[in-house]
Image (cartoon, grey):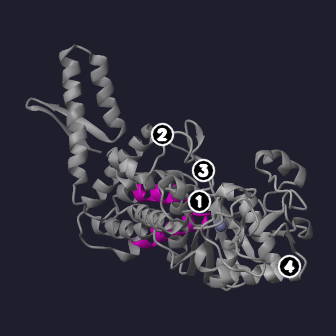
Amino acid sequence: MKLYNTLSKKVEEFIPNTPGEVKIYTCGPTVYHYAHIGNLRTYISEDVMEKGFKYLGYHVDRVMNITDVGHLVGDGDTGEDKMAVASKRENKSSKEIAKFYTDCFFEDCEKLNIRKPDVVSAATDNVEMYIQMIEKLIQDGYAYLSDGNVYFDTTKFPSYYELSGRNQDDLMVAVREDISEDQAKKNPFDFGLWFTNSKFNDQEMQWDSPWGRGYPGWHIECSGISIKYLGEKLDIHCGAEDAIFPHHTNEIAQSEAYLGHKWCNYWVHLGFLNDESGKMSKSSGEFLTISLLEKKGYHPLSYRYLCLNSYYHNQLSFSFDILDGAEKAYFKLKNKVLKLKKDEVNESDKVKYIEEFKSYIEDDFNTSNMVTLLYTILKDDSLSDGTKYSLIEEFDGVLSLDLTKEEETSIDSDMDQMIQEKIKERQEAKKNKDFALADQIRDELLSQGIRLVDTREGTTYELL
Ligand SMILES: [Zn+2]
């Protein structure tokens, strides 16, 4: 099993702490707003990772947090708590905001066939754990009290810059705007573990602590929840690539300082989704959610199909043209699978394909090769329809594209409608003697595997 590890910047052989078992921690959403489709791409990749490990026979323990306190607008401890911003925006309590957007997040996940991890824990449910960790960090000299807040002293942790692969000066330049102006910090990259005396004393969610009433910083949540539910040794920690610094860098520092040994062996980071304006975000460009795609008439799983056709570490470009292409390809694939006869299954014919599929999982979750393999299977004349169906059904347990699930609204009729419209357009073009356009329409359909057949009775089509 090969995995790209951000820690070593290399593809490495994956060796779990306990043979046959994988402990995975996933940074969950900050529930102050809807998730955009770029956020959801990360969870699709992590879902395939969990299902892929299980297909290979691993026992998987996976934990995800829900950030419902402490994530400030600026990653360098600046700005308000995002939850407080949402409370003001929507005139609701932080609790109401958290519940609403947590539910929305899992509804989106369900539409995308993303399995909910076994343990999902809200940051606000684990405050005692953070307090216990922070007390020990202070005791051992890794954290200090300043101006009422508790900060982690990054100079006490020599490998602080390992994950990001950058030194302090580089980082100063890279994140200049986000460096805290917090005068209470001894060093610019020190980060808040617990806030009491800050500009957010109107913060709604507060708890008693040895340092006064207050609330935890964002980073300590993930360390606390991970150690509480998965123990002192973690196999894989995943998250979006923008979490490398400061979030994951800070998680490593405080966890290893607290535990006194190495904490997590493999750091897996997922690439951004880019639209025309660059990295997709909630504040720039059109706010693309799964519900919006549905309103525009897309099937959510077309988006999953689009994501699976790229390597998950790489950034992926998004446009509606690209999604159109993915939707057509997805419907066509599903259509072909649903048309397979459920005849005899030849188990021995399946073996080589199963081996090949596993090899793609082991090749750092090469999902685009997994999808391509489905087409190879469909084209293999030596396989019975039943064997093809059985293989695809099995592999779809990892890919989760619902390829063998009959839809209430038939994909056949959606696709048929699209083709009939194109046929009409082409007839219109011919009538106007615009043969170039007529040919273009025919060729376009052909490139999607749809061949138009002109007969005396009119034009029909066949799927290739
Ligand atoms: Zn996290």
Give the position of the C terminus as an image quadrant. top left
Closest to the observer: 395 or 4?
A: 4
For residue 84, the mark is: 1
Q: Is residue 16 visible?
A: no
Comes first in the chain, label 2 or label 1:
1
Q: Is residue 267 above or below residue 38?
A: below
Q: Is residue 257 visible?
A: yes
Comes first in the chain, label 2 or label 4:
4
The image shows residue 224 at horizontal and vertical percentages of 69, 78
Q: Horizontal placement of 135 versus 106: left or right?
A: right
Residue bearing the label numbered 4: 138
Residue occupying the point 68% across, 64% down: 201
Which region of the structure is painted magenta? Answer: 350-376
For residue 319, the mark is: 2
Q: What element carries label 4?
A: helix
Closest to the observer: 309 or 457?
A: 309
